[in-house]
Amino acid sequence: MDLASNLNAVRDRIAAACARSNRPPDAVQLLAVTKGRPPEVVDQAFALGLRLFGENRVQEAKAKLPLCANGIEWHMIGHLQSNKCRDATALFDVIESVDSIHLARELHKTAAQAARHLRVLLEVNVAGEATKFGLAPDQLPALIEQFNQFPRLQIQGLMAIAPWTPEPEKVRPCFARLRELRQRCAEILGAPLPELSMGMSGDFEVAIEEGATIVRLGTALFGPR
Ligand SMILES: *Cc1c(COP(=O)(O)O)cnc(C)c1O
């Protein structure tokens, strides 16, 4: 694995996708997904300038994060159980996978106990897949004000995992739908929801063309898991 050249290639592809969609190249943040990778790999990526990192399991993060460089912004991107909220609050800067009011309430509580605020994204099951977590897209507009009632949580936007496909064009409508949903929720709240976390190694260019502000990449940076 040559991380430096993978990263250069990814940065070029992000810049090209931004150019195609008339977006400035700094409109998209690259989040490095390090699940299953050792702390040395995190530190290598940090040394190359990456600052946003994502993990999908609290257990793994609890062991790994203390061994990694300081100055990282850690994002929780996997399903979170409410009994792990205390640990997640202590470990992460952003929880991208808030998928129920119950979970939001628990995070609000643990954030209050830790005397801090938590940035969160709401995860949407944008294609309605039975195997995925996330809020149903047609139910979110009716729920968004309830999510907004927790003063310790700052809702920054939406997150989605598109269905896996070898042809990323096929999931373009999923990304477009998430963007439209964000717009609708922002109108209901009367406040901007700046972040759209969508796009992984197989589909991030299409996600950027549809408005992604955070792309979450593992394989494209670090090779196969
Ligand atoms: C693993 C994972 C990614 C990264 O997947 P790659 O295909 O390796 O880029 C992105 N988002 C979530 C939620 C993940 O669990």
Image: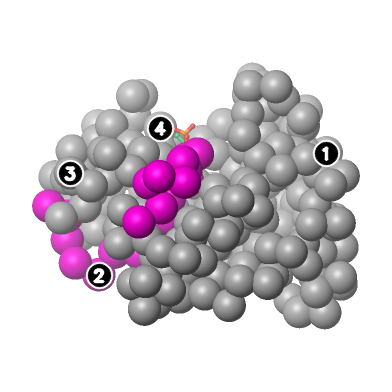
- Alpha-carbon neighbours of circle 2 within 10 Å: few (<14), some, or many (≥20)? few
Q: Is residue 22 left or right of residue 109?
A: right
| Mark 1 secondary-structure assignment | helix
Q: Which residue is mark 3?
A: 63
Q: Nearer the viewer, mark 1 or mark 2?
A: 2
**Contact? badges 1 and 2 (CB < 8 Å):** no
**Contact? badges 4 and 3 (CB < 8 Å):** no
**Residue drawn 42% across the image and 69% down it:** 111
Can you give x and y, in whole percent of width and height, for residue 50 in the image? Answer: 33, 59
Residue 84 falls within the magenta-colored stretch:
yes
Q: Which residue is mark 1?
A: 173
Q: Is residue 180 left or right of residue 37?
A: right
Q: Does 82 appear above or below 169? A: below
Give amino acid for label 4: Thr
Which image quadrant is residue 93 in?
A: bottom left
* 186 and 111: which is toward the camera: 111
N-term mark: 1 or 2: 2
Q: Marks 3/2: CA distance?
A: 17 Å
Can you give x and y, in whole percent of width and height, for residue 55 in the image? Answer: 37, 44
Q: Marks 4/3: CA distance?
A: 22 Å
